[in-house]
Image: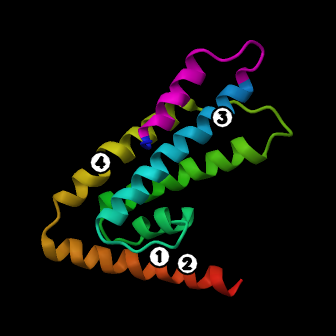
Amino acid sequence: MEAIDFRHIADHLLACPPKNKEEAAERTAVNRLYYAAYIHARDVMRSWGCSLGVAGGHSQVFEGLKCSGVRDIIEIGHKIAELFSERLSADYKTEQPRGFDVQKLRLLHEHVVEELGCRWSHLTSAERSEALDKIQRRVTSIEERSRRQ
């Protein structure tokens, strides 16, 4: 299975929600859009040599990217964090009906998938090494903090 498969499921749910289940379909689509972006970013980071925790923790991915020191990579980290926040709302804040800006979330997902590897490949070897060092330090600090809790 590939991360993009989650995007396809989200698109299908939004195009053909079960009758009288539009909110559930929308909330599930938000979840799938987040996971499609998260898994893609996690796998790309691992391909760079980034050592993520056993589960490749969610915050490790977006917080690591946000600490890279590279403007475009930082922006991608913020987009994943926004998708994560929307996913939490969709999954856990069910007590009140809520509409999600699914089109915006689709665009966030697309930006992550299309830009992460591209922006990284445009960096020099020295820039990649420096960014990876910053990312890895942040990822490690999150892992250590979670072990202490």
Image mark for residue 13: none
User: Which quadrant, please, contains the C terminus?
Assistant: bottom right
SS assignment at label 4: helix
Q: CA distance from mark 1 to mark 3?
A: 28 Å
Residue 120 relative to residue 51: left or right = left
Residue position for label 1 = 139
Residue position for label 4 = 115
Q: CA distance from mark 3 to mark 4?
A: 25 Å
Residue 32 lies within the magenta run: no
Q: CA distance from mark 2 to mark 4?
A: 25 Å
Tag nearer the camera, 4 or 1: 1
Q: CA distance from mark 1 to mark 2?
A: 5 Å
Label 1 neighbourhood size at 10 Å, few (<14), some (14-19), many (20+)? many
Give the residues drawn in magenta, as a range: 4-22
Image mark for residue 28: 3
- Choose between 148 and 69: the one closer to the eye: 148
SS assignment at label 3: helix
Could you tell me which residue is drawn at 64 percent across and 79 percent down?
146
Residue position for label 2 = 142
SS assignment at label 1: helix
- Marked residue nearer the N-terminal end (2 or 4): 4
